[in-house]
Image (cartoon, helix red, strand yellow):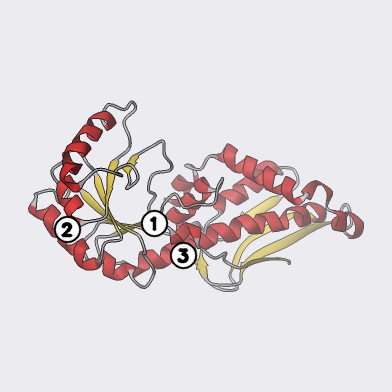
Amino acid sequence: MMAAMARLLDRQRLRRQWEDALQEDGAERDLTSLAVAPERRIVTVELRARRPGVFAGAPMFDLLREAYPAQVTATLHVADGQGIAAGERLAVVTGPLRLLLAIERTLLNFLQRLCGVATLTRAYVDAVAGTPARIYDTRKTIPGWRNLDKYAVRCGGGHNHRMGLHDAVLVKDNHLAGIEPARLAAAAVAMMAEITALSPPPDFIEFEVDSLEAFHALLQVPGIDVILLDNFSPADMRRAVALRNAAGLAGRLQLEASGGVSIDSVRAIAETGVERIAVGAITHSAPALDIGIDAC
């Protein structure tokens, strides 16, 4: 499954990100290595986890082999999505000392970020295990890193929300500003007519609500795939689930909880019966997983 996911990454974009990062770091003129590292020396290094977590980053080793085919050999000892222990060997890389020193920090920056997102995602996924709820990411990603951040979420067992503004419709509070609750159903029906005329059609159609009154109004609107319950209390989420089920829409209309979700609150949210929980923290607040590179 992870190999199939890795193929979903835009490899050309990843290569550009890698090259931009190396340029930013001045890797073409590593003054320290030029001064002290023997020019022709070949070394083997190991990458080891210094903290437990979840691995994400197999495409980075494909990139090394593609970018430096005559210079570098790289053997990965773990798989994307695999739990890793502190001290565990992740990979072995052999190549010219100067080259490995020049790319070391950049490689670690990529891997630590990817593994950090996957590790935090797994914590949320584990917290809701046994409930119908799935953990979804958001667009709260590092600019330029969305493809990689969302890949890491999948490695952690999470699910991807829309990739961006271009692939799905999410009608949020600012789109609905000025529409009174009594007029919401009619306004949403008019919006749905415009949305369903889009070509190509969106992957899904979602509306955001911030009250049970607004939620009840949208239950009258056919064609909506997901309703986002913004900052609802668990009690109101349960009421929304009950209203949806009473309307005969279970299995056709999914409910998504969003806003103020933490690792401490996510289980209670999942137990309300919502199918989706959007967690911005898994990308905007994921700490890097500590990984080291050392000569064998």
Horizontal arrangement in the rendering, residue 125 relative to residue 116 (left or right): left
How many labels were placed on the picture? 3
Q: Amino acid at mark 3?
A: Leu
Q: Amino acid at mark 1?
A: Gly
Q: Mark 2 and mark 3: span between their CA atoms?
A: 27 Å
Can residue 81 be seen here? The reply is: no
- Residue 201 x/y as whole percent: 31, 30
- Residue 95 x/y as whole percent: 76, 53
In the rendered image, the vertical position of residue 100 relative to residue 291, given as above or below = above
Which residue position holds label 2? 241
Please tell me whether mark 2 or mark 1 is closer to you in this view: 2
Q: Earlier in the sequence, mark 3 or mark 1?
A: 3
Q: Is there a contact, CB below 8 Å, between mark 3 and mark 1?
A: no
- Marker disc for residue 211: none
- Residue 278 x/y as whole percent: 35, 56
Please tell me whether mark 2 or mark 3 is closer to you in this view: 2
Q: Residue extending furthest right?
A: 35
Q: Mark 2 and mark 1: span between their CA atoms?
A: 22 Å
Q: Mark 3 and mark 1: span between their CA atoms?
A: 10 Å
Residue drawn at point x = 17 percent, y = 58 percent: 241
Mark 3, other Cα within 10 Å: few <14 / some 14–19 / many ≥20 = many
Q: Quadrant of the C terminus?
A: bottom right
Callout 1: SS = loop
Which residue position holds label 1? 158
In the rendered image, the vertical position of residue 122 relative to residue 102, given as above or below = below
Residue drawn at point x = 19 percent, y = 47 percent: 181
Which residue position holds label 3? 120
Residue drawn at point x = 37 percent, y = 48 percent: 161
Q: Earlier in the sequence, mark 2 or mark 1?
A: 1
Q: Amino acid at mark 2?
A: Val
